[in-house]
Image: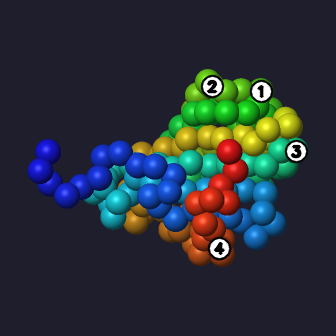
Amino acid sequence: MSDDKRYVFRESDVPIFENPSKTMQDTVMVTEDTCGSMQNTAGLFWLAPYQMGGDGESHSGIDELFYVSSGRGIFYLQGEPLRIQAGDVCFVPKDFHHRVENDGEEVLKLFWITHERWSKLPEIRDMFADWPVIDSDSVWA
């Protein structure tokens, strides 16, 4: 593999964003710019203990997957509460509203992936424009 594309990422390799209320952190790791991905965008999301992950979101015409790497909580899909814990995979069909709540004592950490390139996700890019970048030492465990 002699090209200069990245195939393996660490949290410290990309900017880490934190929402203004300091309850959520997020990264965008897999994009056209980071590795040349023209079909997927992926990253990591952290939610502080006992917090609701904002008002939620939906993506027009785009499915999304989440893998719960640590913690536990409630995943709301179209308003229906679904219990989640480390090791679970959550599928969000296109256009479904979703949000997550951390009702546990530890940070809830999710890996997320959409089947769309980063440049075609303006609503997510715009949201991160309002979130400051933090130092990788400030990421929650």
Of tags 2 and 4, the one toward the viewer is 4
Task: Sort mark 1 into few (<14), some (14-19) or many (20+) by Cα contacts within 10 Å.
Answer: few
The residue sitting at the left extreme is 2
Say whether residue 37 is left or right of residue 138.
Answer: left
Question: Is there any visible trace of residue 92 in the rendered image?
Answer: no
Name the disc covering residue 92, or none: none
Name the disc covering residue 50, or none: 3
Task: Sort mark 4 into few (<14), some (14-19) or many (20+) by Cα contacts within 10 Å.
Answer: some
Q: Secondary structure at mark 4?
A: loop
Say whether residue 46 is left or right of residue 50.
Answer: left
The residue sitting at the top extreme is 87
* Residue identified by numbered label 2: 88
Q: Amino acid at mark 2?
A: Asp
Spatial distance from mark 4 to mark 3, Cα to Cα? 22 Å
* Residue identified by numbered label 4: 132
Spatial distance from mark 3 to mark 2, Cα to Cα? 19 Å
Q: Amino acid at mark 4?
A: Pro
Does label 2 or label 4 sit earlier along the sequence? Answer: 2
Q: Give whichever of 70, 117 is nearer the camera.
A: 70
Does label 1 or label 3 sit earlier along the sequence? Answer: 3
